[in-house]
Amino acid sequence: MVVLSRIYTRTGDGGDTRLSDMSLARKTDPRVAAYGDVDETNSAIGVALAHRTAMPAAICAALDRVQNELFDVGADLSNPLAVNPAHPPLRITAEAVDRLEAWCDEFGEDLPTLRSFILPGGTPAGAALHLARTICRRAERSAWVAVETYGTEPAGDETAGGINEVAVRYLNRLSDLLFICARAVNGAEGEVLWVPGGDRDQDADESNSNDVSDQ
């Protein structure tokens, strides 16, 4: 059980914080950055779910589950790997990653094949999901910085505990799912495809020529 009786504690005023194993870390630590970006991803998904009436029920149910699992991911990233820990830590599981992949297949099955990149936007719900996707990508990059800093092995006599790679894989698959969900919510008619620079200039020239000829 989590009990939050008082929100401010003043204990972090010097730039330090406690990881889940109660070890001390700087607030600039890559692990802190990673689980902070996970929290931001979760918040962005919450913004998308504020538009749940505009989204299919199945996608809302999946994202409700994801929001809970992101707390597991954050707890995982904040708990360095250790051999035989006194208290079994909360870890994200491979089963959760498999579930994300199944949702990707389910929600993406009827989507048309893309011939170009999509400009982020569309409906308010779709735009929020695109934003959540980009934040999730950042969270994954932050997690990889933590992996490069601390590795993926349990703590040793002279080394800090590493990062659970399953948590990083979860973030990778989640960003894919959020992209697919954004497409499904916006619908093909709501997608605006990226037009590369040269093609944009050509389209603009043709449009100007047509305008002149109409006069």
Image (cartoon, helix red, strand yellow):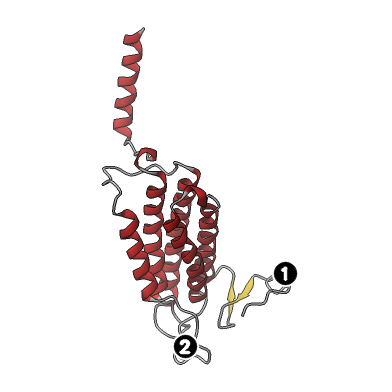
Quadrant of the rendered structure where residue 166 is? bottom left
Of marks 1 and 2, which one's residue comes earlier in the chain?
A: 1
Residue 162, image x, y percentages: 44, 79
Residue 113, image x, y percentages: 26, 47
Q: Which mark is residue 86?
A: none
Residue 138, image x, y percentages: 45, 59
Q: Which quadrant of the rendered structure holds the C terminus?
A: top left
Residue 215 in the figure: left or right of residue 61: left
The residue identified by callout 2 is 158
* Residue that appears at 37% across and 40% down: 191
Q: Residues within 10 Å of mark 1 (few under 14, many from 20)?
A: few
At numbered mark 2, what does the secondary structure look like: helix, strand or loop? loop
Q: Which mark is residue 8?
A: 1
Q: Which quadrant of the rendered structure holds the N terminus?
A: bottom right
Comparing 177 with 150, the one in front is 177
Tell me the amino acid under the disc marked 1: Tyr
Comparing 113 with 185, the one in front is 185
Residue 62, image x, y percentages: 44, 62
Residue 48 in the figure: left or right of residue 197: right
User: Height in image: 208 above or below 177?
Assistant: above
Tell me the amino acid under the disc marked 2: Glu
Quadrant of the rendered structure where residue 105 is? bottom left
At numbered mark 1, what does the secondary structure look like: helix, strand or loop? loop
Q: Are marks 1 and 2 in contact (CB under 8 Å)?
A: no
Comparing 4 with 196, the one in front is 4
